[in-house]
Image (cartoon, rainbow, N blue to C red):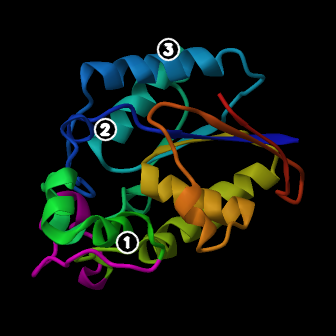
Amino acid sequence: MVKLVLIRHGESTANADNIYTGWTDVDLTRLGVKQAHHSAKMLADLNFHPQAVHTSVLIRAIKTANIICEDRDWLYLPIYKSWRLNERHYGALRGHNKDQTRREFGKKQVALWRRDYWTMPPLLTEPDHDRRYANLDSRSMPLGESLAMASRRVIPYYVDQIAPELIAGHDQLVVAHGSTLRVMIKYLEQITDRDLDGVEVANGEPIVYELNQHLDILTETVL
């Protein structure tokens, strides 16, 4: 039996301000830092011994992972940072207040942008220019993503980088973002496109999977 733990980063400044963020790099709030420390405390009660940590290239996830690792004396562990674990790209919505977009476009349209698996947000006119993505093929840089599009980068990372370690019996910790963890959960639990709408991932709340040697889920616990 092996454990996979998924944790959404602590509250970010964008979460606190209720704005779309996506690939925009924002920091943790004081509450977000407290949530990260609390996540570490909850993990202390588990028989969980990760041999690697996986996170995105965005500050809010990296800092959450670092806080957890420091509190648990795991700073010696390898931490793999990948753009494939970035939050879903919200395109031209990023930086906009969510309540304002509901007033402007209507609650139904905003619900589709946020929760529907296939609906794309309004797109940017050109991709992000950031040196952390300088080595990526420009065709990999999104102008905006549906959840389905985000899944096409998240799931290959899980299959190629995380699943082999789990099969080898090595516990793994993933510290990432709400939308990208939702699509990973969809894959793990074989959730339908429609039912994914009901899946929520709270800030700093560990989700613990116990898996057998075939990576079938034995138990799932939300701490």
Secondary structure type for disc 3: helix
Tell me if I can see residue 124 in this picture: yes
As shown in the figure, which amino acid type bears the numbered disc 3? Answer: Asp
Residue topped by disc 2: 60
* Total count of labels: 3
- The magenta segment: 118-139
Q: Where does the N terminus fall, quadrant-wise?
A: top right
In the image: residue 156, left or right of residue 4: left
Distance Cα–Cα, label 1 vs label 3: 39 Å
Q: Nearer the viewer, residue 169 or 61?
A: 61
As shown in the figure, which amino acid type bears the numbered disc 1? Answer: Leu
Mark 1 and 2 residues: CB-CB less than 8 Å, in contact? no
As shown in the figure, which amino acid type bears the numbered disc 2? Answer: Arg
Name the residue rendered at 44%, 32% in the picture.
65
> In the image, is residue 137 part of the stretch drawn in magenta?
yes
Nearer-N-terminus badge (1/2): 2
Q: Position of residue 154 (x, y in %)?
A: 50, 65
The numbered dot on residue 71 is 3
Residue topped by disc 1: 112
> In the image, is residue 90 part of the stretch drawn in magenta?
no
Q: Where does the C terminus fall, quadrant-wise?
A: top right
